[in-house]
Amino acid sequence: MGMPATASPLSRLLSAPRLPVLGLMAAAVAALASALIAEHVFGLAPCQLCWWQRYAFAAAIGVLLPGLLFDRKPAARGVVLGLGAAAYLAGACIALFHAGVEQHWWQGFTACTASGNAAGSLDDLRAAILAAPVVRCDEIAWSLFGLSMAGWNVLYSGGLAVLAGAAAILTFRRSA
């Protein structure tokens, strides 16, 4: 059965069962790749809240991955897309909290992080920990058009949460 001529663009996009899942996973991979490039190429060490935002993208990939198996089970794919929306919403909330800490709207955490480099011995590990830069969550390391990376992530993750939620709703409607 073909798509009606009045079908919305999102509805037409959902006619390929794996496409929304793949697109949402690709968006998470792109965000993680951008974070790694910012860290390893441009030297922008992540703070604790930056790490948490990365975990949200990894969670999105993890919950969306099973959706690739549900070509013939739209209700199950809808659940997966809903879980993806929840992961992106969690990431947007973490990013909003981080942006608020950067703007001094509220107090952040006192925890800081060291680099994830493995050391060969206990003395090497101790030296690496002591030499690691202290990255504060309340200092903006980089911004573009007045928004920090956390601010941009609020928009990015929030937009992806809306897209994933809309895809879940449309998928459920199509399965009914």
Image (cartoon, helix red, strand yellow):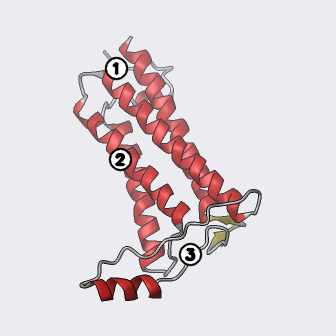
Total labels drawn: 3
- Up the image or down, 15 lies above or below 47; here it is above
User: Who's the residue at 38% across and 52% down the image?
Assistant: 58
Q: CA distance from mark 3 to mark 2?
A: 27 Å
Secondary element type, mark 3: loop
| Three-letter code for the amino acid on which mark 3 is drawn | Val
Foreground mark, 3 or 1?
3
Q: Which residue in the protein does label 2 denote?
A: 61
User: Who's the residue at 74% across and 63% down the image?
Assistant: 103
Which image quarter is the C terminus in? Answer: top left
Q: Which mark is residue 135?
A: 3
> Residue 173 appears at what percent x and percent y?
44, 16
Q: Nearer the viewer, residue 3 or 64?
A: 64
| Three-letter code for the amino acid on which mark 1 is drawn | Ala
Alpha-carbon neighbours of circle 1 within 10 Å: few (<14), some, or many (≥20)?
A: some
The reply to whether callout 3 and callout 2 are in contact (CB within 8 Å) is no
**Residue placed farthest to the top in the image?**
176
Q: CA distance from mark 3 to mark 1?
A: 43 Å
- Up the image or down, 7 lies above or below 129; here it is above
Q: Which residue in the protein does label 1 denote?
A: 75
Which image quarter is the N terminus in? Answer: top left
> Residue 140 appears at what percent x and percent y?
66, 71
Secondary element type, mark 2: helix
- Up the image or down, 130 lies above or below 106; here it is below
> Residue 49 appears at what percent x and percent y?
55, 61
